[in-house]
Amino acid sequence: MSGGSAPVLSITMPTRNRSALFERALGSVIQATASAADHVEITVSDGSDDDRTGKVVERLLATWPGRHRYVWNRPGLALVDNLNRAMELATGEWIQQLHDDDYLLPDAGAAMLDAIHRAGPDERLLLFGVRIVDEDGAPMRERSFRAERYLEPREALRRLLRNSSFVRQPAMVIHRSALEREGLFDASVGEATDTDMWVRLFSRYGVRCVPHATCAYTIHEGAITDGMWNPGTIHAVQEIFDRAVALQLVPEPKIRRWQADFLHQFILAGAYRRLRVRRVAEGREVLQLFKLPEVRRLGLSAKWLPVRVAFAIAATAGARWGG
């Protein structure tokens, strides 16, 4: 780790037992920030069972001119604790978290630093676009904003709670003072911990949306998020929306309508991941989440009803043909 003044941006990288994916991610950070390394810090929290990831860090960062910090946690930390540990290591004014199966796009460093320098004195959150890719890195689609815009807290909360994919984790850049005030990821809400954090942050600070894709978000079967479609996650989402109601920023009936949209989109996304690769039985299992009491009492989502009907037909047809 090199000395000097505090960096502008810390890129935090939690990882465990995926040294090949981690090497791709770390290499992308080095490339994307090459022209501004003096302003960037890399922190790695490694929960791996062996030292392969540590050797990747040693090899790739041997000549890295910016700061870096690496810890090998023995024994390995639980998922949320590892996310938080990577952020606790950071000393930068702004923090971005990059998971080991995602990676930065080549011009991401300049884009993030430029947006940081343009941020208003009271702004604490920057949200960039993402390129969604498959496990081989082939682009599937891109999610970005048409124009740069600051969303005040109420509108930011609406966008977040109506759209389960509004925020992809590596697209967020957060001022460290916001994390110091609101806290890190809350392990009590399980796999929905990132949504809980965005609710806390958006409801206080709003968010600036920047029309520039900075990262690739990978969808693949080995992703941690691939196992999120289960009753436990639905219960966690219920807790998050209850917390949003308690903020009293928006009337409860409106938040519950947003919740119906959010859960419909979330469940249908899980079903789509399985149906598109002909895992029809698993797709039908995900669609069974609509029968949970906390989902049923919200009612239908007019926005997502046509997709729900289409997926139900596809799942039924698959069953009829032995899928």
Image (cartoon, grey):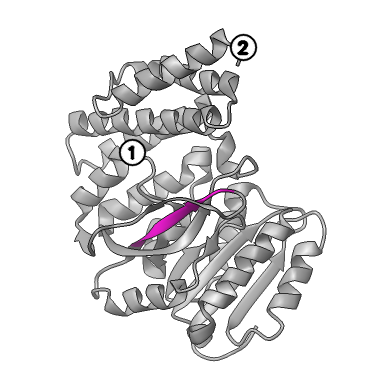
Looking at the picture, does residue 255 appear above or below residue 110?
above
- In the image, residue 293 lies at what x, y percent? 40, 15
Q: Residue furthest left?
A: 251
Magenta stretch secondary structure, dominant? strand
Secondary structure under badge 2?
loop
Does residue 292 appear to the left or right of 254 in the view shown?
right
Residue that numbered label 1 is attached to: 243
Q: Quadrant of the C terminus?
A: top right
| Residue labelled with disc 2 | 322
Residue 195: percent from the left, percent from the top? 41, 45
Left or right, 318 with respect to 161, comes to right
Residue 162 visible, this angle:
yes
Which residue of the protein is positioned furthest toward the right in this rendering? 50
Residue 161: x percent and y percent? 30, 40
**Residue 84 in which image quadrant:** bottom right
Can you name the residue that lies furthest to the top here? 320
Magenta span: 127-134
| Residue 150 numbered tag | none
